[in-house]
């Protein structure tokens, strides 16, 4: 081949290669732009997050169970009492189905410890030994409820603890809870196992939590996924992949001021939405404003506002050392927080012992 012709062929090949490289580069840039815009559009706006704290329209106040709770918590049960006699004693001051279910829930959650050896599965053994696993709790609630004239079902499914980050964090072995039919034919959720306390490092800590008696289905679905869709008790059931994606929100959020319907829609419609880690702690407050995400940015400002009793103290603890106190105006605690360093920022309430206990934990990037 002559030199000039050879140069022409090489030039053509190089041009073709450069055209391909340009095409690939343009395609890659377009794809990156598409992914960026999709991610950006999936990020929930501050306006959307604000709806989570709006009051529930025509919200019906919760029944006052203090009389029934105090009665059940003060019961002294003799030895060798039969199950039927025990149920009659527990529900002695209960008139409605709701009251009977409440009395049974309180007694089981307050008297049956969780078996950290995972061996006691029958209600009879749990009654005799005072401990059991979720099968024992749910079967005991079913049996007690039926003896009290209630219609009760056991619901098997999967659950997520509050440290959940990925599907591998699902509770091993599954879980079981209950639904009980009310006077108006409404099915109500009850989880006496989670209402009894929590397990950490194979040690059970009793902590009666009434938030697992009649929790809102729109919030309960964030941690409990029944095998049968109908027991989600939602108008439109959540798919399993949606459940695995959603953060593990606690039913306590409703008593803290979160609107359950708005919260459910917010996380169902925003695939990139996240929530700070929650700690298990007793706190009485209302949340007017807080960042609804798990990550804060250094140098960016974030507004917090809570309603607490006047004798409380509230602060953000940065990286377990720097403490930034909220400004107090009556029972309103507010703070515009600007993270200065990467790490962690924990919203914490001061205990009577003088120490702060964390409620929410944000990662700072």
Image (cartoon, rainbow, N blue to C red):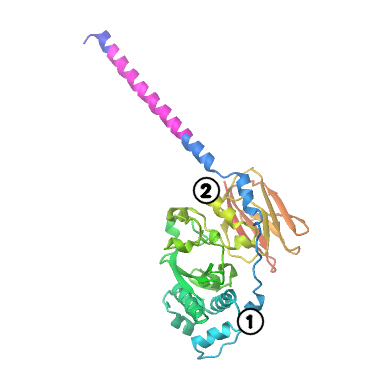
Span highlighted in magenta in the image? 7-33
Q: Quadrant of residue 253?
A: bottom right
Is residue 239 highlighted in magenta? no
Q: Position of residue 265 (x, y in %)?
A: 55, 52
| Secondary structure type for disc 2 | helix
Label 1 sits on residue: 71
Is residue 15 highlighted in magenta? yes
| Secondary structure type for disc 1 | helix
Q: Closest to the observer: 360 or 192? A: 192
User: Marks 2/1: CA distance?
Assistant: 44 Å
Residue at horizontal 63%, vertical 50%?
Answer: 51
**Label drawn at residue 91:** none
**In contact (CB < 8 Å): disc 2 and disc 1:** no
Label 2 sits on residue: 269
Residue at horizontal 67%, vertical 64%?
Answer: 284
Residue at horizontal 50%, vertical 54%?
Answer: 246
24 left or right of 71 in image: left
Q: Closest to the observer: 71 or 183? A: 183
Q: Position of residue 290 (x, y in %)?
A: 64, 52
Q: Would you call the spot at circle 2 few (<14 residues within 10 Å), some (14-19), or many (20 or more)? A: few
Position of the N terminus by quadrant: top left
Residue at horizontal 42%, vertical 63%?
Answer: 228
Q: Position of residue 34 (x, y in %)?
A: 47, 35
Main secondary structure of the magenta stretch: helix
Residue 159 can be seen, yes or no: no
Q: Quadrant of residue 20?
A: top left
Q: Would you call the spot at circle 1 few (<14 residues within 10 Å), some (14-19), or many (20 or more)? A: some
Residue 91 can be seen, yes or no: yes
The mark total stands at 2
Q: In the image, is residue 56 above or below residue 190?
A: above
């Amino acid at each position: 081949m002559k030199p000039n012709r050879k140069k022409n062929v090489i030039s053509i090949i190089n041009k073709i290669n450069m055209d391909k490289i340009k095409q690939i580069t343009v395609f890659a840039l377009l794809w990156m732009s598409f992914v960026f815009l999709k991610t950006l559009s999936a990020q929930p706006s501050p306006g959307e997050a604000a709806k989570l704290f709006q009051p529930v329209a025509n919200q019906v106040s919760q029944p006052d169970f203090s009389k029934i709770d105090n009665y059940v918590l003060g019961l002294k049960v003799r030895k060798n009492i039969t199950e039927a006699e025990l149920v009659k004693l527990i529900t002695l001051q209960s008139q409605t189905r709701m009251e009977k279910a409440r009395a049974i829930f309180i007694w089981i959650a307050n008297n049956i410890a969780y078996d950290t050896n995972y061996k006691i599965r029958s209600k009879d053994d749990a009654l005799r030994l005072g401990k059991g696993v979720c099968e024992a709790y749910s079967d005991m609630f079913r049996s007690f409820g039926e003896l009290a004239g209630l219609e009760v079902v056991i619901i098997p499914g999967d659950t997520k603890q509050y440290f959940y980050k990925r599907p591998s964090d699902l509770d091993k072995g599954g879980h079981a809870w209950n639904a009980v039919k009310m006077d108006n034919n409404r099915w109500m959720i009850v989880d006496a196992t989670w209402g009894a306390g929590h397990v950490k490092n194979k040690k059970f800590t009793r902590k009666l939590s009434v938030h697992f008696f009649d929790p809102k289905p729109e919030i309960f679905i964030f941690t409990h996924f029944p095998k049968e869709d109908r027991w989600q008790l939602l108008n439109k059931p959540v798919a399993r992949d949606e459940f695995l994606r959603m953060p593990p929100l606690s039913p306590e959020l409703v008593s803290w001021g979160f609107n359950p319907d708005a919260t459910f829609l917010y996380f169902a419609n925003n695939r990139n939405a996240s929530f700070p880690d929650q700690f298990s702690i007793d706190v009485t407050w209302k949340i007017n404003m807080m960042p609804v995400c798990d990550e804060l940015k250094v140098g960016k400002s974030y507004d917090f506002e809570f309603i607490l009793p006047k004798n409380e103290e509230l602060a953000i603890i940065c990286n377990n050392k720097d403490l930034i106190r909220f400004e107090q105006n009556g029972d309103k605690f507010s703070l515009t927080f600007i993270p200065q360093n990467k790490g962690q920022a924990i919203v914490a309430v001061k205990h009577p012992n003088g120490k702060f206990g964390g409620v929410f934990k944000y990662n700072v990037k």
